[in-house]
Image (cartoon, grey):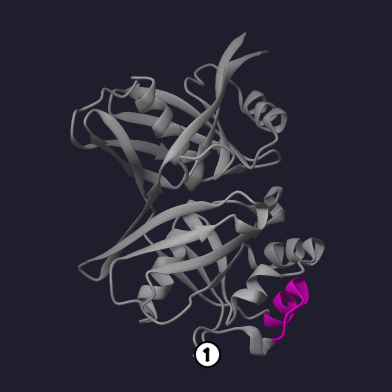
Amino acid sequence: MEVKIFQVDAFTSNLFCGNPAGVVINAKGLSDNQMQNIAKEMNISETAFIIPIDENNYKVRFFTPTHEVDLCGHATIASFYTLALKGIIKPIYRGIKRVFQQTKAGKLGVEIHYDNGKIQKVIMEQSKPEDLGSLEEIDLLLEAFNIKYKDIGIAGKSVRPRIISTGLPDIQLPLKDKNILNNLDVDFKRLKNLSKKTDTTGVHAFYLPEINSDRVFVRNFAPLVGINEEAATGTSNGGLIYLLKKEGLIKGQEILAIQGEALKRPSQIYCSIEEVGSDYRVKVGGKARIVLEGKMYL
């Protein structure tokens, strides 16, 4: 059996930057075990498996090298960039083409932005944001990251770590200083145990330079699902803008998350949020670039 597969750097337009994802553009006929083995063989944080339903709807499943996950932001951006670039999604000359992905986190909209017939960026809708409460296991968090309680907060304001989900539950960890963020000494075994205990995917550590900053610096750690650190994380940054908005730490509706610096794979994740009645709608997105294209023989 021949499977066409791509490796795509998401949240960047530059070679050797961003977060690599595997993309299988037609996974029809693949078993769960084959998908998991392909993801293991690719050995990157996530591989997406796409089953086209019609020209505007696509079923998508996401696998790390060790687990299936409900949703993956960077693999979504990589997938729909590839579908659009290869003409599977019919292009438009200028404007926004809206399609949908059916995932285990629900049916979510994806916007492909075009100008002069070229793809400018891909934006994905996140699941409805959920605040799952403050983290109670603070001591375990401090031990896993080798930090002190006084290191936690934003611009002198006390902000407790909270568990937020826009498709995947993550512990959002605010840090007062960028040097602390840059030099985290993570005990991955302890962090894995913390993730199990709290039923979370991982920890999204961030530094907001000041209240109402339009940029935030982030690092993401998820050893429980086989990813010690990730260069760009769509769902976690969706949860982050929701937290910042809910806590009154940003007044606007957009923020740029800078991730991957510690891995020397800088990424830029565009995040937006809008109030819809009593709820919020969160979107994240960015650019992408195909770096490998080939066939896998099963």
Question: Is 259 left, or right, of 191 in this rendering?
Answer: left
Q: Quadrant of residue 34?
A: top right
Question: Is 53 left, or right, of 142 in this rendering?
Answer: left
In the image, is residue 113 above or below residue 153?
Answer: above
| Span shown in magenta | 138-148
Of residues 286 and 235, which is closer to you in this image? 286
Q: Is residue 260 magenta?
A: no
Residue 50 visible in rendering: yes
The chief SS type of the magenta part is helix
Q: Quadrant of residue 92?
A: top left
Q: Quadrant of the N terminus?
A: top right
Q: How many marks?
A: 1
Q: Position of residue 107 (x, y in %)?
A: 35, 42
In the image, is residue 269 above or below residue 47?
Answer: below
Question: Is 104 left, or right, of 114 in this rendering?
Answer: right
Disc 1 target residue: 158
